[in-house]
Structure formats: structure tokens, C-alpha cells
Image (cartoon, grey):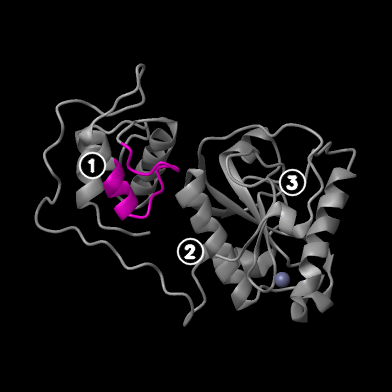
Amino acid sequence: MKLVSRSEWGAARPTGSYIPVSSTKGVKIHYEGSAVPGALASDHSRCAGHVRDIQASHMANRDEGWIDIAYSFVVCPHGYVHEGRGLHHKNGANGNGPLNAGHYAVCAMVGTSGITSPTDDMLNGLVDAIEYCRSEGGAGSEVRGHRDGYATDCPGDDLYAWIQQGAPRPSGSGAAPAPVPPSGPSAAPPFPGRILRLAEPMMRGSDVRTAQARLIERTWNVGPDGADGWYGEHTRSTVVAFQQDSTANGWPLDDDGEIGPLTWAALWDRPVTR
Ligand SMILES: [Zn+2]
Ligand SMILES: [Zn+2]
């Protein structure tokens, strides 16, 4: 992923504190819905300035009272993912408080004049951002448009049609990660003699480490310490995301953030779809 950090695009500091979110149901896609300069299309050196313009217009909007750019990320025509409010922060773009906490908000530099439809690089950047929200930000499997659940044209008909197709990478580009096949009738090691969960005092052990290692093997990120054998908040939120993703892919699990026998089995036996 071609990530452009806030300092790299020259973000102004937020005027207030972010509201933390540990996990979301997924990602909502936005477009700018206004004129997006066509000159951006052939000149990536202009993109950082355009993100600064978006941030400035948001922070000047007294009706909304935004403390920062409203989006979690902004993707330019060249596929660069600009960090807005970033991961684990509630965004301001989806329409109201519950919608903002429910999904990350990823905006494409597409508008109603100038750049009016997404480029292949942009679609790849959007998928990069979605995968980043899932692997590092506790996002579930949903990909929706701003118009889902809120009265707006956003993200425009082209991007919405792409979402309806399942938000695929453009054909012939950026292959999806190789699937991790389940092996045998049940490849799962024996379920440990306890349900693994966030507890006080914190659970620790080789069974926790085994589950964390399997999550990592299946491309789920369990936090900066990796498979450290401690069942902390990052592991819990990752398990919630895994459970929600399983449910969305026909392997129903309660999204309680606990590893009982069903979630343990799914970690090994569920075919990988991400
Ligand atoms: Zn929108
Ligand atoms: Zn660009």
C-alpha cells in the first residue's frame, strides 16, 4: 500500500480529541461530490495540496463543527492512500454518530466535474485502504456506500456500482493474497480446556499464542507484539473482526470476541475468503 502519512501531506493538527473506536463493521466509500480538478489526474505532486484543501474546507465548516478532515482516508487517482483521521478513530463523514462509529470512511478523489470516475490505480488504492482497515483497524468485512443508510448521492453511480460488484481489484492488477487452505476434515489442534477471552487478570499461555499465530497466518493483525501469548484488547478486537467476517462469509459465529470451541474450529477449518 502506498500510504501517505499526515505529516507527509502536511496535515493541520486537529482542533479536538478523536473518539476511539476499537472495531467497526467495515468501510463506507465516499466521493467528494464537488469539482475535482482534472489536472490532478496527470500530476500526483498536486494531490497532497488537494487533501490539505479538503481538510481546510472541513475544518471551516461551522455547521458540522469538524475537528479535522472528516474522512478516515483519502485515495488519489494514483492509488496513494492519504491518512485522514486514520485507524481506531471515529470519523465524521458517514452522516451521524452511530454511522460514523459503525464504519470507517474512505473517500476517493472523484467528483461531479473534472475527475468524475475512478481510475484503476484509485480502485486498487481503495482496496488497499479497505484491507488496511481490516488488518490493522479492526474493521469487519462490510464494504458499503455512503448512501447505504443515509440519504445522499455519495459515492456517485460509478463507485456505487463497483461496491455492488464486491469492490474488486481491477482485472489484471494486484493479485489477491494466496488463500490458506484448510487441510483434512479438521485441521484444528485440540480445543484448549478454557475459553480464551479478555479477562482480569489477563489470560496468558501457549493456547493464546497458538490462536494468535493462526490469526496472523490468516493475515489478521493481532497487534504490535504479534503472537505474544497475552489475550489483550488488540487480540479481542481482532477476534471480533474475524467472527464478523466469518458470519459474513457463511460461517456464523457470535461476535463476542471470545475464542470458544466454534471460533477455535473456524480459525483452522473455515476456508479463507479474504
Ligand atoms: Zn460521502
Ligand atoms: Zn495522487
Image mark for residue 166: 2
Left or right of residue 103, residue 114 in this image: right
Q: Name the residue at 37% across, 55% down.
A: 219
- What numbered label is drawn on residue 131? none
In this view, 261 is above or below 34: above
Measured Cα–Cα span from mark 1 to mark 3 = 39 Å
Residue at the spot x=71%, y=52% of the render? 6
Q: Which residue is mark 1?
A: 210
121 part of magenta stretch: no
At label 1, the amino acid type is Thr
Is 38 left or right of 211, judged from the image as shown? Answer: right
Disc 3 or disc 2, which is closer to the eye? 3
Which residue lies at the image location 48% right of the left edge and 43% below the top edge? 138
Magenta segment boundaries in residue numbering = 212-228
* Residue 106 x/y as whole percent: 64, 55
Regarding residue 23, the answer to whether it shows in the image is yes
SS under mark 1: helix
Residue 102 vs 75, above or below: the answer is above
Q: Quadrant of residue 64?
A: top right
Whole-percent x, y for residue 250 in the image: 31, 51
Residue marked by disc 3: 70
